[in-house]
Image: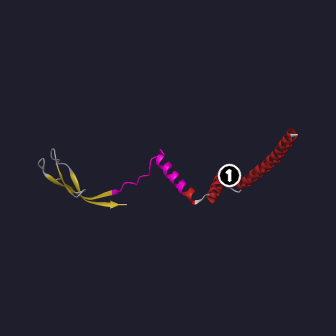
Amino acid sequence: MTNLVARDQLVSIFERWQRLEEEKAEISEGLKELFAEAKGNGYDAKALRLAFRAKVKADEADPADAELQALVEIYLDNLAERPRARPAPARVEIIEKIPAPDATPAGAVVAAKTSGVAARRDGPPYDDLEIPAILRRVS
C-alpha cells in the first residue's frame, strides 16, 4: 500500500513539474518578445535587463544591506588595480625672473621661498640659477 501512495505522490510531483516547465517556457518567450520590442524602439536589451535587476534588488534591499553594499563597494574600489584619478597639476606662469644672488658661501643660510622656512645651502653656489620672483597660479 505504501508503494502505491509513494507512486501517486511521485506522479503528482512530476505533473506539477511539467506544468511549471511549460509556464516557464511561456514566460521566457514573453520576455524574449518584450526585449525584442524594446530593442526595436532603440533600447539596449542587455542594459535594460541589468537596470531592471538592479531596480528590483534596490527595492527589496533593507537599510542594513545598503550599508553593507556601500562597504563592499569601498573595498572593491580600494582593491582595484586601475590608477586612481589625480587632480591635474596647477599651471604656473612666471611673471618676472630675477637672477640668483652672487656666489653664496657654502653653509650660508638662504631663505626658502616655497616653504617659508630658512634652509641651509650646502655645496657649491649656483651662479646661473634663476629664481622666479613672483609665481601666479593660473587655472
- According to the picture, the residue beneath numbered tag 1 turns out to be 45
User: Where is residue 36 drawn, in percent x and y?
Assistant: 73, 52
Toward which corner of the image does residue 117 lie, by quadrant?
Answer: bottom left
| Extreme residue in the front direction | 1
**Residue pictured at 65% horizontal, 57% vertical:** 56
**Residue 124 point in image, percent of width and height:** 15, 44
Q: Residue at x 66, y 50 (%)?
A: 46
Hey, what amino acid is under mark 1?
A: Ala
What quarter of the picture does the N terminus occupy? top right
Q: Nearer the viewer, residue 135 or 78?
A: 78
Task: Please report the bounds of the magenta region as a residue range.
Answer: 67-91
| Residue count near mark 1 (Cα–Cα under 10 Å), binned few <14, some 14–19, many ≥20 | some
Q: Give the SS element for disc 1.
A: helix
- Along the line of sight, which residue is nearer the eye, 107 or 13? 13
Could you tell me which residue is drawn at 41 percent across and 52 percent down? Answer: 86
**Quadrant of the image containing the C terminus:** bottom left
Q: Give the answer, above or below, for where 3 lies relative to 53.
A: above
Residue 116: image location, x then y, percent: 22, 58
On the image, which quarter does residue 3 sit in? top right
Q: Residue 55's image quarter?
A: bottom right
* Side of 12 where 128 appears, left or right: left
